[in-house]
Amino acid sequence: MSIAASQQPRRHVRRRTFLIGFGVIALLIAGVVSYIASSSPDGLDSATQQGCQTVTVNGTEELTGSCIAQHATDHAMSSSPLAEYAVKGAQYTNGIAGIIGVIVTLALAVGAFWLIARGRRGPDNDAAVPDSVPAGD
């Protein structure tokens, strides 16, 4: 048995362990850390709101004064199920929305990488991948 062949299972276990660990950490960050994230506006929101004040009128927030943000409108996805980092706009669901986002993103990435790898193999999907590349190539 060659050295490259004996390393193959070990490499597979390391990769699987890394990917599982990465997934768990991503889900923990999305599901737990999102609850302690700041609700204050970020730099862009803060910059566009300079010169205005936010006031509540009839239960909705409105801007008074003169600022760029007064001309803002809702984006096309503002009525989507995960808009505003919450599930259907419900309060305290940003962790759930984050977990859903991580799962969808990882699924799309795995699917894309699988398609790329499949395409690189060429028309013969049963072609064997060499264990090692000769030195100098």
Image: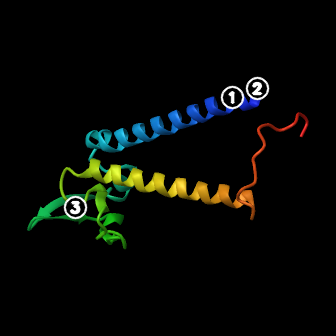
Q: Residue furthest front?
A: 1
According to the picture, the residue beneath numbered tag 3 turns out to be 89
Secondary structure under the numbered disc 3 in the rendered image = loop
- Residue at position x 34%, y 50% in the image: 98
Q: 97 above or below 10?
A: below
Do the numbered discs 2 and 1 sit on residues whose CB atoms are within 8 Å? yes
- Coloured how? rainbow
Secondary structure under the numbered disc 2 in the rendered image = helix
Q: Nearer the viewer, mark 3 or mark 1?
A: 1
Do the numbered discs 2 and 3 sit on residues whose CB atoms are within 8 Å? no
Residues packed near mark 1 inside 10 Å, few (<14), some (14 to 19) or many (20 plus): few
Please provide percent x and percent y for residue 19.
51, 39
Between 123 and 48, which is closer to the camera in this rendering?
Answer: 123
Q: Quadrant of the N terminus?
A: top right
Residue 27's mark? Answer: none
Please provide percent x and percent y for residue 66.
29, 65
**Does residue 102 appear to the left or right of 1 in the view shown?**
left
Q: Quadrant of residue 85?
A: bottom left
Between 109 and 65, which is closer to the camera in this rendering?
Answer: 109
- Residue at position x 27%, y 39% in the image: 36
Between 120 and 46, which is closer to the camera in this rendering?
Answer: 120
**Does residue 103 appear to the left or right of 70 in the view shown?**
right
What kind of residue is marked 3? Gly
Between 17 and 9, which is closer to the camera in this rendering?
Answer: 9
Residue 62: in sight, yes or no? yes
- Residue at position x 32%, y 58% in the image: 49
According to the picture, the residue beneath numbered tag 2 turns out to be 3
Quote the CA–CA distance across marks 3 and 1: 50 Å
Please provide percent x and percent y for residue 60.
15, 65
Q: Nearer the viewer, mark 2 or mark 3?
A: 2
According to the picture, the residue beneath numbered tag 1 turns out to be 7
- Residue at position x 26%, y 42% in the image: 35
